[in-house]
Image: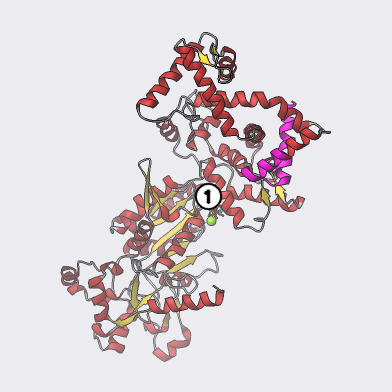
Amino acid sequence: MDILKKIEMQRHEEEKLKWEGTFAEYLEIIKEKPWVAQSAHSRVYNMIKDAGVEKVDGKNQYQFFSNQLFGLEEALEKLVEEYFHPAAKRLDVRKRILLLMGPVSGGKSTLVAMLKRGLEAYSRTDRGAIYAIKGCPMHEDPLHLIPHHLRQDFFDEYGIRIEGNLSPLNTMRLDKEYGGRIEDVIVERIFFSEDKRVGIGTFSPSDPKSQDIADLTGSIDFSTIAEYGSESDPRAYRFDGELNKANRGMMEFQEMLKCDEKFLWHLLSLTQEGNFKAGRFALISADELIVAHTNETEYRSFISNKKNEALHSRIIVMPVPYNLKVSQEEKIYEKMIRESDVSNVHIAPHTLKVAAMFTILTRLKEPKKGDIDLVKKMRLYDGQNVEGFNSADVEELKKEYNDEGMSGIDPRYVINRISSTIIRKEMTSINALDVLRSLKEGLDQHPSITDELKERYLNFISVARKEFDDIAKKEVQKAFVYSYEESAKTLMDNYLDNVEAYCNKIKLRDPLTGEEINPDEKLMRSIEEQIGISENAKKAFREEILIRISAYARKGKRFDYNSHDRLREAIQKKLFADLKDVVKITTSTKTPDEQQLKKVNEVVARLIDEHGYNSTSANELLRYVGSLLNR
Ligand SMILES: Nc1ncnc2c1ncn2[C@@H]1O[C@H](COP(=O)(O)OP(=O)(O)OP(=O)(O)O)[C@@H](O)[C@H]1O
Ligand SMILES: [Mg+2]
């Protein structure tokens, strides 16, 4: 469908959602759909919940965030369950400013933007629908029209609590335009939109000397004072500050802690009492979520200042740490690259993973338990199996520090290095080595890295490089085997037949000649030696495998290539050992003969077809592995 058609359809859809009617008619809607009268916090919470919650390992994962924020599941769970949920239930946290605290480029702005865009979309759905007094610059809640002394009766009839006073402007309009007849006041459905300044606002402090509180709370409209006769006539006031416009929805307060105190006080009275003072009017009620963000240093210096004590108790701080999982970090880079203008460059497989390993290592803290190193910790955090450790150990590790993920290399740095490599070298294809090199060079220019830290980071680059070497070797060796899985399976079946015969002290039958033969000791040992099983230990190992097979059989499960970690490793190593010479010679020879050339082309083709390389990156990989094997 062409874009103009789509635009037209969209307009049509929006048109259909519009609603306008009297307050009396609005009450009918409320009877049927009481949720349209929910508070701002409750709407945000329901928006998050409606997107779906998935239980993973006993923890709640909120799908609302899952296509844009990666690896922050725990922080988000805390945010939703310790702030949004209680706030939605009108508990006291609602009256505090939500302050997201985390390291640079850790996703704070992304999180806020998701909430804003989410609310815009949600207000266009049935579950997120919202109504306001028509013509009110603050989109005031129509229920404010109900006088205080009747609110208990309203609650008894509708089960809805009303908070807040009718604003000075609407008090006057009720009187002048509607002759006090509440039921006639016109109500309309509104749709949040940051661009149109409906229910979504952003405040960003500028020079404290020139900044005017009017930016937050609106100002007198001097052009109309003459018309209305007095400054205290609400019609002579423009309720167009960020706090006014964000009413019913949310306001983002950027760089809040850099702000002048007088601004902060306004905010605090708003959040605490649910109202703020503007011009010469009675307090104005507002219902909005206020989100601010800051980094740790700024926050520490803020709370260390005695003057800020009162402010401090009115803020609720939620940490937004860096992601600590390699696989999730990869997703972050993929997303950032997709959104950038280098998205057409070929990135060799494993490149982002290797970069992510480096990044995660810089963020992790040294484990306190002696038997685990940083690389193992990195694997465990990513949910991989590490021999000798289980998920309880992972939880223990996480508890060792409560501020892990608050420092280290940020994703933007990595993406900047990747793009500068691409641009500088005009490359159409980059690989892990290019990126590691670039990350290394970049450390010199990084403004906030001390010499000591640099030393540490350089070491992590070598660690990531070693990991890459392993990955590269495996990849090429696998590609050398016509069908790797097939070969591994055949070799294993062969091994198992021999082990069975050995343990049961029986003979095997030669498939070709039909002759009875003894178990092939040489074959079995050549596999077992790969994982360091000694002559003395071989019997126990073989028996253990047979026991495992029969345990599988009892449960009706098939014992296969993946059923036994160590055996799989042994088989893999054996296959690679047999291949090593072929791979070594084929990949490193400068003048390949016809046979070798054929093999190289075959391997390159397999790398391209099955493993996601292009011809440049596949050839680079082969050359690199050749040099590795010849060291
Ligand atoms: N955990 C994450 N998941 C997905 N993307 C992330 C994550 N962390 C960072 N990013 C990406 O990194 C970039 C920077 O993030 P963002 O601007 O949201 O960070 P920030 O915390 O607001 O940083 P700053 O303190 O510099 O303002 C964005 O492109 C964002 O999408
Ligand atoms: Mg930001």
Q: Quick check: 156 left or right of 625? A: left
Q: Quick check: 202 left or right of 185? A: right
Q: Answer with the quarter of the image where residue 163 lies.
A: bottom left
Q: Quick check: 458 left or right of 272? A: right
Q: Is 187 covered by the magenta stretch?
A: no
Q: Secondary structure at mark 1?
A: loop
- Specify start and end residues of the magenta stretch as a single range: 602-631
Query: Viewer-proximal residue, 124 or 209?
Result: 124
Residue 336: image location, x then y, percent? 59, 54
Q: Answer with the quarter of the image where residue 491 lies.
A: top right
Query: Viewer-proximal residue, 11 or 288?
Result: 11
Vertical order, 405 against 392 (above or below)? below
Q: Is residue 617 visible?
A: yes
Is disc 1 surrounded by few (<14), some (14 to 19) or many (20+) residues within 10 Å? many
Q: Is 622 covered by the magenta stretch?
A: yes
Q: Residue furthest right?
A: 591
Residue 444: image location, x then y, percent? 70, 42
Q: Residue at x 45, y 54 (%)?
A: 65
Q: Residue furthest bottom?
A: 227
- Classified by dominant secondary structure, the portion drawn in magenta counts as helix
- Looking at the rendered image, the quarter that the C terminus falls into is top right
Q: Is mark 1 within 8 Å of ligand 1?
A: yes
Q: Which residue is mark 1?
A: 106
- Looking at the rendered image, the quarter that the N terminus falls into is bottom right
- Residue type highlighted by circle 1: Gly
Q: Residue at x 36, y 53 (%)?
A: 83
Residue 303: image location, x then y, percent? 45, 49
